[in-house]
Image (spheres, grey):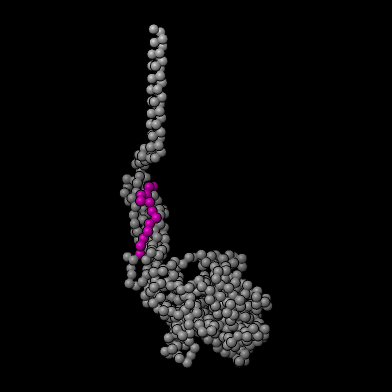
Amino acid sequence: MKKNLSLLLALLLAVCIFATPISASSFQSQFEQLGMSAQGIYIENLDTGVVMYEKNAHTQMAAASLTKLVTTMILLEKTEDLDARTFEAPGAIFDIISQYDSPSHADIKRGATLTARELLYAMMLPSANEAAYIVAYNLGGGNISNFVYLMNAKAKQMGCLNTNFTDPCGLDPENMTTAYDMAQIIKYMSTYMEQRDLFAQVCKTTSYTMPAGVGFSTDGEYSIWTTDLLIDENRGDVYYREYTQGGKTGSLEDWQNFAAWHQQGDMRFVSAVLHASSTADSYQQQYYPTKAAKPALYETCILMDWVYDNFHLDNALDTGAFVTERKVKYSIETDTVKLFPKEGLYTILPNESDQSAIQKTYDLPETLAAPIQQGEVVGTVTLSLAGESIGTVELIAGSTIERNQVLYIISRVGEFFGSLYFKVVLILSAITAVIYLIIFLYINFKHKDDRKIRRTNHY
C-alpha cells in the first residue's frame, strides 16, 4: 500500500512540477502601478497557469517562517496516526531557539509529549518554532540535520531549485527561497498533496485549543491563534478577505513574507509576497498605529483585490465551438471541413477586454486530403494575448469525409506529371535524345565521308 501511495505521490509531484505556467507579461505594467514594496512577488492563476504578476520571482531571499510549510508537508506525509501522543519535546531544542530574539512560539514546555495534530496547528497558526523543532527531532531520529536533509530533498523533488533550508523553522536567515518556489510549494500542498483537505482545514482555522499538560505557562488548556489575518473574520478586520483560503506568514528583521492561495467564484490563485517592508502597511498606519505592521498581508490584500476587481476567467475556446475550416481534396461530398478544438481553453482577461483581444495562430495545412475521420486531429491553434502565448489546443475534424477514388487517381496522375521527378526524367530523356541524335548524325556523316573516299580511290 505504501509503495502504491509513493507512486501516486510521485505522479502528483510530476504534475505539479512540470505544469509550466504561462507568462502574461502584458499584465506587468498594470500591477507595477500599485507600487508594492515587496522584493519578490509571484501570482499564478491555478485554472489556466497564467502568471498574473512576477517581480524578482526567482531571486533568493530569506524564507523565515515560510520554512515551516515544508516541515508541515513532511509531517503530514510521514505520519499515519495524527492523534498518537508520541512526539517528545527534548530540552535541547529549546536551548537552540533561545539563542534568537523573541521567536514565535505555542508555549510548549520542555519534556511535553504531543500529537502530530497539535504540532501541525502549532506550526501553522502561531508559527511556533519549538513545534517545528519537535517535529524535526522526532522524525529525524533525534538528529535535526537528518530532517533538514529531507526538507531540501523534498524541495528539489518539487522543482524548487532555488530553495535551501538550514533549520526546520526559519529562524536562521540562511534559509533561502524565492517567490516562485514558495508559490509552487503552497500550490502543491493546497491542490495536489494527498492530505490537502486536512491542510486546508488547518489553514482555515483561526484558533486551536492545546490540551492540559502541554503548556509552559499553564497546567490547563489554552488557545493558540493564527497569524494569518486574511482568514480571520473576527480578528482580521480590514485585513480579512473572504477569498483567501489559507496561507503562511514569516518575518525577520523589518520585513514580512506571506504565501497563500485564494478562490473567488471560479478563479483560483496562488500568491507569494516576500520581504515586504514594514513601512508599507497602510492599514497599520491608519488603523493600528500601536500594533506591529503586517506588510506582506497588506500587500497581498492590495494585489489580490486588484486581481479580482480587474480580471475575469474567459472561455477562450469551447469544445463545441467552430474555430475555422479548411479546403478538402479528393472528395465529391464537400469542398471544406469545419474544425473544432479537441479541448476547451480558459484564460484570464482584463475586464475591459473580450475575446477580440485574443489572436489565433494556426499550424494547419491549407488543404486537407480525404479520407478524414470525425474527431481526427488535423493541426493546432495557438492563442496569444498581447504577443504572449496563453495556450495551444489541437484541432479536430467536425465530420467524416470519404475519398473519391476516381478524383484521387486523376489527381495523383496529374501530380505525377507536374512533379519535379517527372520534370527531371523528362529533361534527362530530352538530353539523352539530343545526345543520341548528335551521335547518330555524327556516325551517319562519318559513314558518308568514308563512302566518298572509297569512290575516289576506286576511280
Q: Which image quadrant for residue 66?
A: bottom right
110 over 357 or under it: above or below: below
Queried whether the magenta region covers residue 359, the answer comes back as: yes
Q: Which image quadrant for residue 404?
A: top left
Left or right: 11 with respect to 378? right
| Magenta span: chief secondary structure | strand
71 over 283 or under it: above or below: above
In the rendered view of the protein, which quadrant contains the C terminus?
Answer: top left
**Residue toward you, 335 or 169:** 169
In the rendering, at what x and y percent does residue 255 appear?
50, 82
For the point 32% across and 65% down, which residue is it? 356
In the rendering, at what x and y percent does residue 357 appear?
34, 66
For the point 38% across and 28% down, which residue is it? 434
In the rendering, at what x and y percent does residue 105 appear?
58, 86
> What is the total number of numbered labels drawn onto the structure image?
0
- Tell me if residue 293 can be seen: yes
Residues shaded magenta: 358-371
For the point 63% across and 83% down, which residue is it? 114
**Residue toward you, 72 or 37:** 37
In the rendering, at what x and y percent does residue 295 appear?
47, 83
**Residue toward you, 150 or 321:** 150
For the point 55% across and 80% down, which residue is it? 65
110 over 375 or under it: above or below: below
Queried whether the magenta region covers residue 382, the answer comes back as: no
Left or right: 118 with respect to 257? right
